[in-house]
Image: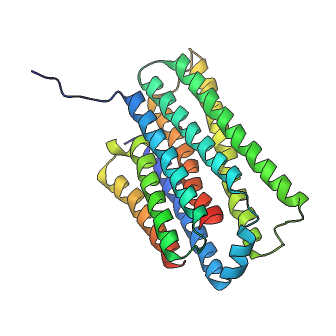
Amino acid sequence: MARPRTVAPGRLVRLVFVGLLLLTAGSSWFAESESARGVATTAFVMTVVAAKLHLVGMHFMELRHAPFALKLAFHGWIVLVWGLIVGLS
Amino acid sequence: MPGEAGVWVLVLGEMSMFGVFFAIFMDARAGDRELFARSQQHLGIAIGLVNTIVLLASSLFVVRAVQEVQAGGFGRASRFFTLALSCGLGFMGGKALEYGEKLHAGIYPVTDAFYMYYYVLTGIHALHVAVGMCVLAFLRKATRNPSRRPKATTVEACASYWHMVDVLWIVLFPLLYLI
């Protein structure tokens, strides 16, 4: 019987780190290439930021193993910050 | 729960406080978009990008250190804390360079509203980085001492504070440099 494939914890966080670097580079390049930085650019950049915050929270801060209320508070903050920044831009 | 409940109250409290700062900045920006866009052009995106990468790397080293502590590898954990601390120093060095460059060019907190927010927001964040570096130095020392090894929950709690510093910069970087 085949064993379920698992990723070693050290390898998983290195993969997350590479993902974070790619998201950072990609969103910086996108924002720099946009001459008119309007609401759409802000919304895109902040969506990438939200994805990065989710990755840091779940994999670096170990929220994957946290109670639901803590996960909810952390992600609620992400949604609130996204809404504030995009809404006021 | 990773770490201790008290640290999460502190972390979420600090995040909420910065949430208010972000809203105040965006409200001021909405009042004078032209000025904020013009002033932002004098910020070098490269140094902000390098500082982001340095902080992300520091967080990776802290995660690896926590994993080593959980596995009982205190010696390796100490080395990862040293690497994370070096990244913290690198970040502060980058910030000092950036401030020096701006001040040399005659750009001060009183220059305009954008730069007032730039200095205040990055200054408060740098203060958090400095506190986080003290925490990392404590963990580095504690994991090196075989007679007084810290509990895994203490290390996780301290690590959460450092990751919060990273979380705040992940928002501050695009807020000041990109959008």
Q: Quadrant of the N terminus of chain A?
A: top left
| Residue shown at the point (42%, 48%) measured from the top left | A55
Colour approach in the figure: rainbow
Q: Is residue B138 something one can see in this rendering?
A: yes
Q: Quadrant of the C terminus of chain A?
A: bottom right
Along the viewing direction, whichever of A88 and B50 lies nearer the viewer = B50
Q: Is residue B14 something one can see in this rendering?
A: no
Residue B88 vs A89, above or below: the answer is above
Residue B128 vs B65, above or below: the answer is below
- Residue A80, position as x, y percentages in the image: 44, 69
| Residue shown at the point (52%, 36%) measured from the top left | B60
- Residue B140, position as x, y percentages in the image: 62, 27
Residue B68 vs B120, above or below: the answer is above
User: Residue B178 vs residue B12: left or right?
Assistant: right
User: Residue A6 vs residue B84: left or right?
Assistant: left
| Residue shown at the point (37%, 42%) measured from the top left | B1
| Residue shown at the point (65%, 85%) measured from the top left | B31
Along the viewing direction, whichever of B72 and B123 lies nearer the viewer = B123
- Residue B55, position as x, y percentages in the image: 60, 43
Along the viewing direction, whichever of A59 and A1 lies nearer the viewer = A1
In the picture as drawn, the residue positioned furthest to the bottom comes out as: B31
In the picture as drawn, the residue positioned furthest to the top comes out as: B146
